[in-house]
Every structure is written in structure tokens, then in C-alpha cells.
Amino acid sequence: MQHSGEGKKLVILGSGESGVGAALLGQAKGYDVFVSDGGALKPAYKDKLTQAGIRFEEGAHTLEEILAADEIVKSPGIPEKAPVMQAVREKGIKVLSEIDLASRYTRAQSIAITGTNGKTTTTLLTYHLLKEAGYNVGLAGNVGHSFAEQVIEDTFDWFVLELSSFQLDDTYDYTPTVAVLLNITPDHLDRYHYRIEEYAQAKLRITRNLDSSSYFIYNADDRLIQQEYQSVFVDTNDLPFSLHQRPDIRCAARYVSETTLRLDVPQVQDEGPEDVSIARSPLIGQHNRQNMAAAVLAARVAGLSVEQLEAALPSFSNAAHRLQPVGEINGVPFINDSKATNVEAAWYALDGVKAPLVWIAGGTDKGNDYATLLPLAREKVKALICLGVDNAKLRAAFDGVVPVVEETQDVREAVRRAAALAQPGDVVLLSPACASFDLFKNYEDRGRQFAQAVGELAKS
């Protein structure tokens, strides 16, 4: 549905990938656009805005300018309690997400994926499956390029979007063809008044505009989804998936063996249930079985055949820093899971790797409770190397549970010690369970430095 921006003022708060994309789309649709960022603009984004002749400010929010807007697109990173947002809410100006703005101007169908853990892997896998089958498909949201900027040309038939709860908070009109909810576990609770129900409802906003022509794929094994989805009234095609045989629920996808996923989707299948072999998929661990079930189901609903699904699975390579093999030293594989910035994600990694482990963990603790990791650590972890500025909490949790606990502030030293402690048949796993800001710029920087240290030691 087309909206004309003629004569309307659009203000963009925040100038990352999504903000700059929204500014360019707004301008293309005839809005008078102004970009305001409380911090500094990246040079590449500044160049883009300057070349397009779009006005912007950095290091400040000029309220006279912002409050003159007809509509405001805000970056998902700006919290409601920021003074600029309080002023905007007081004035009652319509605030929307880049996703909402972009969805006004595209004819493409879309698959939208959210959840606490596994979003990126599931989004990239779904995109890969469609692309390999010859679909004309774009990738956007939290990964890839800005959705809004890709909609200016609007050349794709499908988009696969990764959406965070922060993006969904400001999404009102966007309607995906297929919505996917992977799981809900405590994360970012500071943005939701420390109420898990409020966070769960933010995730469930992905269903708000679904109707009888759309599909909702969700994890039937997730207690919070089951509980909170009861209170959402949606007339859509529900497609639950499960890692188990579920006598209580008719699942659209469930595992009937370690390597076989059974699809039961009468809406798109003529011949009854079908089995998809995932034996040749490179993804490891329980959580990736969830991610695969969701992606395969989404791709099947989008029209792929079982043959197309099975042909595409083996060639998928996951995003960096997510259970990513980065090399071997003396026959011991080193795995970079730097993206595991919370306890839940680290649990999936420890559970997923089927070998004795030398585990490297630590960083900035986000109020972590390590209790859920203790049984896995006791069973599988031979040594823990704490890599953080303050490791007291990790040591308190795992001293006495894991036979060897050491600490260092140097990633190269962590890799050296891990190589010394590991024997053939073991795996060294970097899965920090913490944020990275104490020793690194971000989790990518941590993962890159780890991979580099492994490469250097392997050579020597």
C-alpha cells in the first residue's frame, strides 16, 4: 500500500544502517527528511546522507526540529526513557520502526523471525534455502542491509527479516506472510520493567496483524510462548514445531529421529506428511535443531519442495561467531561461539558439542545466574579458562565443579592454556555467557581475536 510523503516531515532518530535506510526511502517517497543522532555518525553514513542532500545533526537532538515531525522513525536502540522520546510521546507524534515504514512501499511477501536466541542462524538459513531454490529474495532487519533502503528499488519477491523485540515495539502495520517465534528466555529485561511477561508480549507483537492467509510458526516446547500466546487472539494458521513426539499437540514439524524432520502442513501438502532428512546439515547442537525446524517449515510454506530443502541444507555456512570452527591444534578443534553473550546461549553450546570440553568463558556479567550450566559443566568440562577483567563470579560458580579453573585477561594466553590442557578427542569452546565490553569492542572483535590467536598458535 503506497503512502505519499509529499509535504510531510519525517524525522529519523538514530543513524545506523536502519536509520540511514529509512531516511533514503523517506526522501525517495517525497518526505522532507531530517536525521538526528545523539552520538556521532559513522563517516560512511554521513557520506550517504550528504550525497543524498538529507539534512542531519549529530551529538545533539534539537527538539524544535524533531517535534515539528508528522512521523518519527526511531532506532531500536533508543529506550523510551530517553528525554527525547519522552518529549515526543508527550506531543503525541506517531513513532514507527524502519520495518513499518519500509513495509508500506513493498509488494514483496516476507518471512519475519524473532526470538531470544537463534534468530540470526534461522534467518540466514531460511534465506539460504529460498535463494538456493532460485527465489528472488532479500535479507534484512537485524542482518544484511537496511530493509527500507532495499525497498526503494523494490526488486525482490520475498524478504527474510530478523526482528528484535525492540524493532517490534514500534511496529504497527507491518504484516509478514510467515511469522516465526523461536523461544523466549530472560534477556534485555531492563527495557521491559523487569517483567518477563512484558518482554514475551513484545515478541508476540509479531502476530498482531496475521490473518487466515498468513502463518505463525512457533516453538511448542517453549513454556512461555505456550502461556503468553493463549492471551493473544489471532485468526491465523498456527504451525507449532517440536524436538519431540508430542501426543498433546499436532505439530507442523517434529523430529521423528536425530536426522529426520517430519512436516505435517495440510495447507501446502497434497500427499500428507513428508520427511525431510537433515543428516547433511552442518549445524550442530540441540538449539540448531530448533532453528532448522523453524527455517525448513518457513521455506516449505513459502513453496519449496522436500527435494529443494534437502539439496540446499548441506551448503549452508552459519554466521561468524556462532559455533564456528576456527581451526585445529594438535588434533583438537577450536570453536568460536563469541555470540553467546547470555547464559542460555552458552547452555546451548555446552549441550550441543558432544566431546569433553576446555571451556573459555567470561566478560561483562549481565546479572547472570550460572546455576543452569552447572550440570553440563560437571559432566563435560575438564577445564574452565576465565577470560574477563573480573572473574570472581564465574570462579565462585565453577570452582569445585570443574577440575581445573584458571584465569587470564589475554585472549592469546587463553588459547595457549587451552591448547596445553586439551588432549586429542577434546574440543576447545569459546562460549562466554557474558557481554564482551570489558576487554573487547564487541562480541565480533572477541571472536576475531580468538580465531586469530588460534591461527597463530597453529602455525607455530
Image (cartoon, rainbow, N blue to C red):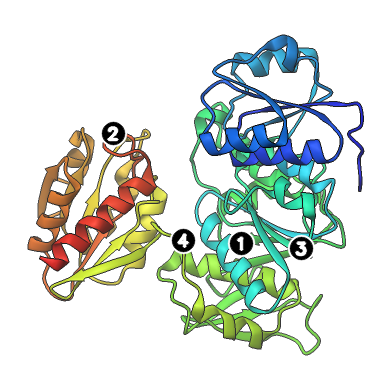
User: Residue at 16% of width from left, 43% of height from top?
Assistant: 410
Mark 4 or 3, closer to the camera: 3
Mark 3 or 1, closer to the camera: 3
- Badge 2 amino acid: Asp
Q: Cα distance, mark 4 to mark 3? A: 23 Å
| x, y percent for residue 301 | 74, 72
Q: Earlier in the sequence, mark 1 or mark 2?
A: 1
Q: Secondary structure at mark 1?
A: loop
- Identify the image quadrant of the C terminus: bottom left
Which label number is shown at residue 33? Answer: none
Quarter-of-image position of residue 27: top right
Q: From where the camera sits, is residue 398 visible?
A: yes
Q: Earlier in the sequence, mark 2 or mark 4?
A: 4
> What residue is pinned by disc 2?
438
Which label number is shown at residue 319? Answer: 4
Q: Earlier in the sequence, mark 3 or mark 1?
A: 3
Which label number is shown at residue 220? Answer: 1
Q: Cα distance, mark 1 to mark 4? A: 26 Å
Q: Secondary structure at mark 2?
A: loop
User: Residue at 92% of width from left, 38% of height from top?
Assistant: 4
| x, y percent for residue 261 | 57, 80
Q: From where the camera sits, is residue 252 visible?
A: no
| x, y percent for residue 240 | 67, 65
Pointers 2 and 3 in contact (C-beta within 8 Å)? no
